[in-house]
Image (cartoon, rainbow, N blue to C red):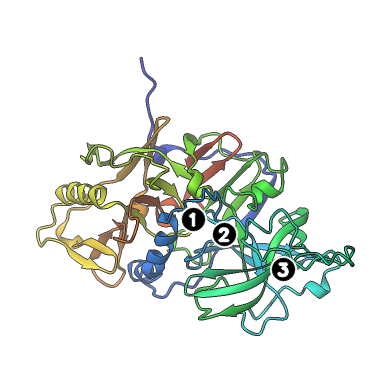
């Protein structure tokens, strides 16, 4: 007899002591007291991030996206430290970027009021243009050496990157990175010295790259964290509560259910998983054949991302999901659109419990039954609720499905790179 597949909504995360556990905080104050209006406002910048996630690397076969160009600020930050002695920093948590970077002093155009000061760190060291990481960042190549002065020091690795509607110029450097009780020596990061353009969408102090490339955290620390990290993201309804970032294999939930982690050589920073279907209530969503297929050549597939706010499905998938959801709800007055959401209805007209749960099915027998607060967003001002998912924007490569942070809240999401798998377990993060 086949084993019973339990919805993850019913699973509780049992844990033991962790190697390193850091608090995760909301990056921005909610723009409205109403959860619905707040999420609509926060999701306005999703399109720029989705454009980045769905773009392919150049046809040269370059397999890294070390600094996430085109992104908007990730929604969560962690407390960290840089230098000796440690200078406290709030770094944006980003699973789709590899490089860690910080705004450094002197910088008259950086948004941070508190900058990392290299001169105050006894262990700060600029990395030369000959560093193996400089080409990853597309840094300026080394100049030809003077044959009469071969001992002359090489210039540091300088690079520039776009970010959202701005760009920054930085120097590649290394220093101690402090995460919780752990201290990591010689950690390579970008030291931002100037910013061009609007700074409102830049992380205020810096970014912690948790992607899969050579400059990402797990790559730089070797076996220190066993190739594993996880997070539990607090709800947007609980702004003053924190979640956690857990580094290392110890303390990861025993109840987690795992799906294989797929790798796209053209977008090697991203965490792809193979979604096999969706359900609304107990009804499977009827999507066209091949709608979830993983295709590295086009970038098609499904990405688990910490920085996108609301989950987006490609047009045929979302159309089928919306139809099935509306069929279950059967709102007498029909549906309206609000912001990115197009399935909003009057809750006074729908019986209590009338909105069904959405389940995401993945390879490996994973049935991720989303909690109702991750499926339906309510307005606190009016009897209105919206399906908290949307269609992927019709940009140059709208073939990527993105499981975003709203749908990951109050779940422990485990990124086990060492074993090429992503796990999910129910956990209260607030």
Query: Gap between marks 1 and 3, in whole Å?
Result: 22 Å
Q: Please, what secondary structure does the residue beneath circle 3 have?
A: strand
320 up-or-down from 43: above or below: above
| Mark 1 crowdedness (10 Å alpha carbons): few <14, some 14-19, many ≥20 | many
Q: Residue 135: where, in percent of width, then height?
A: 65, 57
Among the 4 quarters of the image, the one containing residue 155:
bottom right
Residue sitting at 61 percent across and 36 percent down?
Answer: 418
The percent position of residue 310, horizontal first and vertical second, equals 37, 58
Image location of residue 42, percent across then percent down: 41, 69
Kindly identify which numbered label has been placed on residue 93. Answer: 2
| 430 in relation to 287, above or below | below
Q: Which residue is mark 3?
A: 88
Among all residues in the image, which is located at the extreme front? Answer: 147
Q: Earlier in the sequence, mark 2 or mark 3?
A: 3
Q: Nearer the viewer, residue 14 or 119?
A: 119
Mark 1–mark 2 contact, CB under 8 Å?
A: yes
Residue located at (39% from left, 73% from top): 33
Mark 2 crowd level (few <14, some 14–19, many ≥20, 10 Å Cα):
many
Q: Are marks 1 and 3 in contact (CB under 8 Å)?
A: no
- Assign a secondary structure to mark 1: loop
> Is the N terminus in the top left, top right, bottom left or bottom right quadrant?
top left
| Residue with the mark numbered 1 | 306
For residue 410, above or below residue 173:
above
What's the distance in space between the residues labelled 2 and 3, CA to CA?
15 Å
Relative to 310, is 86 on the left or the right? right
N-terminal of the two: label 1 or label 3? Answer: 3
SS at badge 2: strand
Q: Nearer the viewer, mark 2 or mark 3?
A: 2
**Residue nearest the viewer, comparing 126 with 142:** 142
């Amino acid at each position: 007899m086949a084993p019973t597949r339990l919805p993850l909504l019913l699973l509780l995360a049992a844990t033991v002591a962790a190697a390193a556990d850091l608090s995760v905080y909301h990056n921005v104050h909610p723009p409205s007291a109403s959860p619905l209006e707040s999420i609509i406002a926060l999701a306005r910048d999703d399109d720029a991030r989705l454009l980045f996630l769905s773009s392919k690397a150049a046809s040269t076969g370059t397999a890294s996206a070390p600094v996430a160009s085109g992104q908007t600020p990730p929604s969560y930050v962690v407390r960290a430290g840089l230098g000796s002695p440690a200078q406290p920093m709030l770094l944006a948590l980003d699973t789709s970027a590899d490089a860690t970077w910080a705004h450094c002093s002197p910088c008259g155009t950086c948004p941070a009021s508190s900058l990392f000061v290299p001169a105050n760190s006894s262990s700060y060291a600029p990395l030369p243009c000959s560093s193996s990481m400089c080409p990853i960042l597309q840094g300026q190549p080394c100049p030809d050496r003077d044959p009469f002065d071969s001992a002359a020091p090489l210039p540091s690795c300088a690079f520039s990157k776009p970010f959202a509607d701005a760009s920054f110029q930085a120097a590649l450097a290394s220093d101690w990175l402090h995460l919780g009780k752990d201290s990591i020596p010689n950690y390579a990061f970008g030291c931002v010295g100037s910013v061009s353009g609007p700074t409102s969408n830049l992380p205020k102090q810096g970014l912690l790259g948790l992607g899969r490339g050579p400059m990402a955290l797990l790559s730089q620390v070797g076996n220190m964290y066993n190739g594993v990290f996880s997070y539990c993201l607090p709800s947007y309804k609980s702004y003053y509560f924190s979640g956690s970032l857990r580094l290392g294999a110890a303390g990861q939930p025993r109840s987690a259910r795992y799906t294989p982690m797929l790798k796209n050589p053209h977008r090697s920073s991203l965490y792809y998983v193979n979604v096999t279907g969706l359900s609304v209530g107990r009804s499977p969503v009827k999507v066209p054949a091949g709608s979830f297929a993983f295709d590295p050549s086009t970038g098609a597939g499904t990405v688990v991302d910490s920085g996108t706010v609301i989950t987006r499905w490609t047009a045929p998938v979302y159309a089928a999901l919306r139809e099935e959801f509306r069929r279950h709800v059967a709102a007498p007055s029909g549906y309206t659109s609000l912001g990115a959401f197009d399935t909003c209805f009057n809750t006074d007209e729908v019986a209590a419990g009338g909105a069904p749960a959405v389940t995401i099915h993945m390879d490996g027998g994973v049935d991720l039954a989303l909690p109702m607060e991750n499926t339906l967003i309510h307005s606190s001002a009016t009897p209105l609720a919206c399906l908290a998912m949307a269609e992927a924007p019709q940009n140059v490569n709208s073939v990527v499905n993105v499981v975003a942070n709203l749908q990951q809240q109050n779940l422990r999401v485990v990124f086990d790179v060492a074993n090429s798998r992503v796990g999910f377990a129910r956990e209260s993060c607030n």
